Structure formats: C-alpha cells, structure tokens
Amino acid sequence: MLLNKETELTQDSYYEASVARAAASPALAGRSSADVCVIGAGLAGLSAALELAQRGYKVTVLEAKQVGWGASGRNGGQAIVGYASDDAIEAQLPAADARRAWTLTVEGLQLLRDRIGSHGIECDYRPGYLSLARNPKKGRELADWARHLQQDYGYPLQAIPPQQMPHWIASKRYHSGAFDPNSGHLHPLKYCLGLAAAARAAGVVIHENAPVTQVLRGARPLVKTAHGEVACNFVVLAGNVYLNEFGHAIAPQLSPRIMPVGTYITATEPIDAARAAALIPSQAAVCDTNFVLDYFRLSADHRLLFGGRVSYSAVTPRNLEAAMRQRMLDVFPQLSDLALSHTWGGFVDITLNRAPDFGRLDGNLYYLQGFSGHGLALTGMAGKLVAETIAGQAERFDLLARIKHRPFPGGALMRMPALVLGMLYYRLRDIL
Ligand SMILES: Cc1cc2nc3c(=O)[nH]c(=O)nc-3n(C[C@H](O)[C@H](O)[C@H](O)COP(=O)(O)OP(=O)(O)OC[C@H]3O[C@@H](n4cnc5c(N)ncnc54)[C@H](O)[C@@H]3O)c2cc1C
C-alpha cells in the first residue's frame, strides 16, 4: 500500500509551494459519457487527453487527487532524450526498430517544446543536459555511449574531456562528461498544470478528487467512482504506481510488472545569482551515470534542486533531509552555509528491464506505465501514441508495446526483497 501517512510526508515540494492552483475542479457526480475516459491526470494521462481532444474525441479525465499530484508534479524536471535503458530496447528490437524507438524520444523533446510554445506554458524551460562520469571507467563507458549515439542514431553529444571539466561544473567529484544541447529542464508542476489548461481549452473535462474504484469492462466500459460513472468506448490507464490503490483493483495484472521505487529531492534557499551560475555555468540539468544516481539543476529563482537517494519501501526515510544535504555537500562542499527550504519525494515506476511498458487489455483499455524515472518527455509521446492508436494508427504504439516485460520475482507482494537484492548488486558496482 503506497498511500499511507509516511508517504504523504514526502510531498513538501518546492514546486507545489511555487504555483498558485485554481480551485479544484468538481468531483464526478452522476452518470456521464465520453468517447475516452482517462484515469490519472499526470503527464501521461493529460498528454493522451489533449491529443485525443485535438483529434475530435470527447474525453473525460478522472484524477484521484489533484492534477500533477503524482510523479509528474514532483520530479527532477529533467527532460531527456532516450530511455532509462536503451540497452533493453536494443536487445529486444531489430536495429531498424530500435532506431525508430530512439527517434520517438527525440520527437518527444520536440513535442514538449512545441507544447510550451503553442499553449504558452510558462514553466521555466531551459535547454541543456550534462551527463557526468564519476571515474575513468565510467568516463570510458560514457564516451562509448556518446559514440554509439552519434554513429548509430546520428544524435550528436559533445564529449567533455577531464581537463575541460572545470568549465562545466564547480565540483571535483567528476572525471569527464557529455553535453546534450537538445535535452533540457523545466518546472514540472507548472508544465503539468499548463498541459491541463491546454487540455481543458481543447474540450477535455477533468474531475479532480475522483478516485476510480472500478472499471467494468466490455464493449462499452463503465468507469466508476464513489459518486459517479463514465460510460465510454475506450479507457486509458495512466495511474502510474497508484492505479490499483483505490477501491477495487482496476488492472491487478499490471502491478507486478512495475516496482514503486522512492526517490527524493531537496531544494536550497535561493542563492545569489552569480554564485548559483558558477556552480553549473551552462545552466544545464545534470545527472551522473551511476546506477543509484545524483541529479540536479538550478531553478529559475536560483535554488539548487538536488535529487538522488532511493528507497525500496513505501515509507519515507527518517533522516531524509540530513541525508539529502550530505549527498549535495559531497558534490558541492562549498554550499555548506546554505539552508534547505523543501525536501520531498515520490515513486518512480520501474520495470525489470527499465524499458517502458505500454499495451492494451481487452482491446479497448490501453495502459501506459513503466517510465522507469525517464518519463518527463516520454509521457508526452506515450499520450500521443495512444491517441494515434485509438484514431486507427497503431504502428508507432505497437513498436513499443512489442517490448516484452517480465513480472518482478515474488509478484506484487514479495517484489521488494527481490529488488533490494538486485539493487544492492548494482550499488556495489557503483562503489567498486
Ligand atoms: C522524485 C522523482 C524525480 C523524477 N525525476 C525525473 C526526471 O528528472 N526526469 C524524468 O524524465 N522523469 C523523472 N521522474 C519520473 C517522471 O516523473 C514520471 O515518469 C512521470 O511523471 C510519470 O507520469 P504519469 O502520468 O505516468 O504518472 P503520475 O504523474 O504519477 O500520475 C498518475 C496520476 O494518476 C492518478 N491515479 C492513480 N490511480 C488512480 C485512480 N484509480 N483513479 C483516479 N486517479 C488515479 C494519481 O493520483 C496521479 O495523479 C521522476 C519521478 C520522481 C518521483
């Protein structure tokens, strides 16, 4: 069970504190109908809703809490090309299809920028993404990856050799890096709320505080909440790790295919602008290449937003703020005088092979899950692909839906211990 007192504590986010929400939209009451009912108003659900409405469909979105309440409103804000594991995709798909799958992620970044532009979404977008290696071995792996992207996908990354590192980051922790000018970062909750506004403007009806308790399947599914129901032709399941947390399990067969892994972010108080800019002169989003990674970036109001640490239980770690502070100081010891303003977290929906898990149940229920910590840009494409499919063009959706997934050993109940062992192995590899 993910929704308990301890996990609620992790939501003290800088993002939530820096937006003004409109009054909640009304919960669903009585019976209504739609062509498509979307469950979940995160980036995946809202993207699907917007794309469907733009194609002329009547769409209702049901959100258990508030728009952007889940991972979409709390994440690291790094909109990056590729998948959490490009290897998994290359292992399963023929080379030409793997290339098409890669291209979808490049399109996802363009889609994000286009939406920001065409819907006038003010979300502090900044281009630039810096991958950093912690030691020479990881530096060689990063350089190999950059070469592979260039040669096989025609995607140029700028290699950063060790002697140039001081120009890119004011930290001695890193050996070398690679810069991607095409990826970038933004305020994810502002983007999510902007996407919801664009969807509403396109005719989508969004009900907040409307947890879906049951979906009666059939040729015309009935999606039920405590006080209302939506009859529709298609359902899009975009509930992330929370999908089966309310009332009756909606699609219990999906839960063992993803694992909720907690990851956390801390925000400093605003820093003097020049001092902040000196930390990351390119102002890019930054991520190291470790398996249990650190990811950080500067906000528009010159805070350092520093993410990392993982937990494999649904309970917020007790010493969270102190642990996050230490991680930040390991990278930037010069920030020891700064106070932290917010520390929060959320669950990443990882699959066993870290490739996204898209598919259909019964022909008219589509699911989008398993973004594996790499969903900010990819959710946009997921929504677009599901809309194309419902409109009769399934080819691109099926390219990704063909990827095979195995359930976590131990099923929904026992998957945690198995994952902890697996993660310990990778953690040891990071350290060694
Ligand atoms: C701390 C953190 C940092 C991250 N950093 C990054 C990053 O820097 N870059 C990146 O690319 N990705 C990152 N991610 C991952 C990224 O945020 C997710 O992949 C993405 O937001 C998933 O979007 P979603 O719409 O699938 O899920 P969510 O945003 O979680 O939305 C699901 C919504 O469905 C609702 N819901 C669920 N079940 C029901 C139901 N039965 N009835 C009604 N509503 C329901 C929930 O309330 C929720 O609002 C991060 C994630 C976390 C938690």
Image (spheres, rainbow, N blue to C red):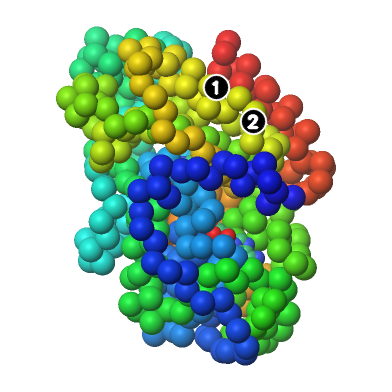
Locate residue 1, reporting x and y percent.
74, 50
- Kind of residue at badge 2: Pro
Count of numbered circles on the image: 2
Residue for badge 1 = 323
Q: Quadrant of the C terminus?
A: top right
Residue at screen point 47% across, 63% down: 67
Residue at screen point 34% across, 31% down: 269
- Kind of residue at badge 1: Ala
Mark number, residue 317: 2
Secondary structure at badge 2 equals loop
Graded by Cα atoms within 10 Å as few (under 14), some (14 to 19) or many (20 or more), the crowding at tag 2 reads some
Residue at screen point 71% across, 71% down: 213
Residue 266 vs residue 141, the one in the foreground = 266
Residue at screen point 54% across, 53% down: 70
Whether residue 295 can be seen here = no
Residue 398 vs residue 294, the one in the foreground = 294
Find out if the beta carbon at label 1 lies less than 8 Å from the nearest ligand 1 atom.
Answer: no
Real-space Cα separation, disc 1 to disc 2, in angstroms: 9 Å
Locate residue 416, reporting x and y percent.
75, 37
On screen, 69 above or below 231? above
On screen, 401 above or below 428? below
On screen, 323 above or below 414? above
Q: Are marks 1 and 2 in contact (CB under 8 Å)?
A: yes
Q: Which of marks 2 and 1 precedes in the sequence?
A: 2
Secondary structure at badge 1 equals helix
Locate residue 174, reporting x and y percent.
37, 15
